[in-house]
Amino acid sequence: MNINSTNKEIYHSLDYSELFFGFSLRNLLFNFKEKVQFSDRFLLKFSMNFIKKVLMMFKALILEKRILVYSNKPSALSNFILALLALLPGTLHFTMDNSAINVVEAGLADYALPLRIFNNKTQLLLYFTINNFDLFDSLDGYLLGTTNSMIKGHKKAKPDIIIDLDLQKIEIFDESLKKALNLNDKEKEFINNLIKKVSVNISEDEKKSWKQFEMMKSLNPEWEGSEDWIRQEFSKYLKQMLSELTLFFNYLKNHRQCKEN
């Protein structure tokens, strides 16, 4: 039996929600909810629910910024980065051949999605080591994971944002970027609704045993607050933002043409 062809056949028949099994978005959005104070130098600790910072990081990804994620646990790095990327519709499809993906991509194409965030100048680097230092000279942006604290503090890295998963803090090194990433009233309403739905009906015992809770809820992946629901909500948010930007640029274009005439 050809194992590779068998795996391809199995993969091709998977439901869309099954393609994301193990990307714990609810864990990403729920588990970082400690509250501490703001400090100097635009050091953003978790004075708001971490889910609000997730939306800020979502926006930073779209802007193709230099985002460095640090943890001394490799599994924490990969889980965090993949969960974050799963919020961007179509980003983790790559060139996979799956009937469910094909249907989803047909709908995304109407909005010019997925966004082409990663390219030669902006790269996804799930695990970055000191052997890759020369890459910094050729990159305008990146989403980078590392377990090496030397890389986090090295002048060549020049990160716009450092996300330290172990200390649960986010550093933003530019005031104008901080302003661009801040949430407006509409975004706060959007994210507060997510917090409410993700947190509802979770007992203290379930919070202590997150894996058991996730497995139980995965039997019905489309309930409000589920992994599928979270991805759908971020997809709606992005589509609405792109639609509004298109209307705005069309308005500017028409206004300019009217003035010229």
Image (cartoon, grey):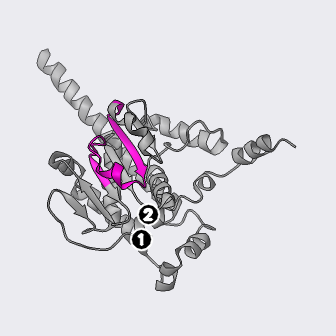
Q: Quadrant of residue 142?
A: top left
Name the image quarter holding residue 251: top left
Compare residues 169 and 138 and report the one nearer the observer: 138
Residue 6 visible in the displayed image = yes
209 with respect to 187 (left or right): right
Q: Quadrant of the C terminus?
A: top left
Q: Quadrant of the N terminus?
A: top right
Q: Residue furthest right?
A: 1
Residue in the image at 32% along x and 48% along y: 59
User: Cβ–Cβ below 8 Å for labels 1 and 2?
Assistant: yes
Residue at 46 percent of width and 38 percent of height: 114
* Residue 230 screen position, x and y as percent: 46, 59
Place of residue 51 in the rendered image (x, y in percent of width and height, measured from the top left): 35, 63
Element marked by disc 2: helix
Q: Which residues are magenta?
A: 138-162
Distance from Cα at disc 1 to Cα at disc 2: 6 Å
Q: Amino acid at mark 2?
A: Leu
Taking depth in this image into account, of 259 and 180 the one nearest to the observer is 180
Q: Which mark is residue 127?
A: none
Q: Which mark is residue 31?
A: 1
Q: Is 158 colored magenta in this rendering?
A: yes
Decide: is 166 above or below 174: below
Number of residues whose C-alpha sits closer than 10 Å to that of mark 2, classed few (under 14), some (14–19) or many (20 or more):
some
Please state the total of marks drawn on the protein image: 2
Foreground: 38 or 180? 38
Residue assigned mark 2: 28
Residue that appears at 43% across and 55% down: 147
Residue 145 lies within the magenta run: yes
Q: Secondary structure at mark 1?
A: loop
Residue 237 at what x, y percent from top left? Answer: 37, 50
x 38%, y 56%: residue: 70
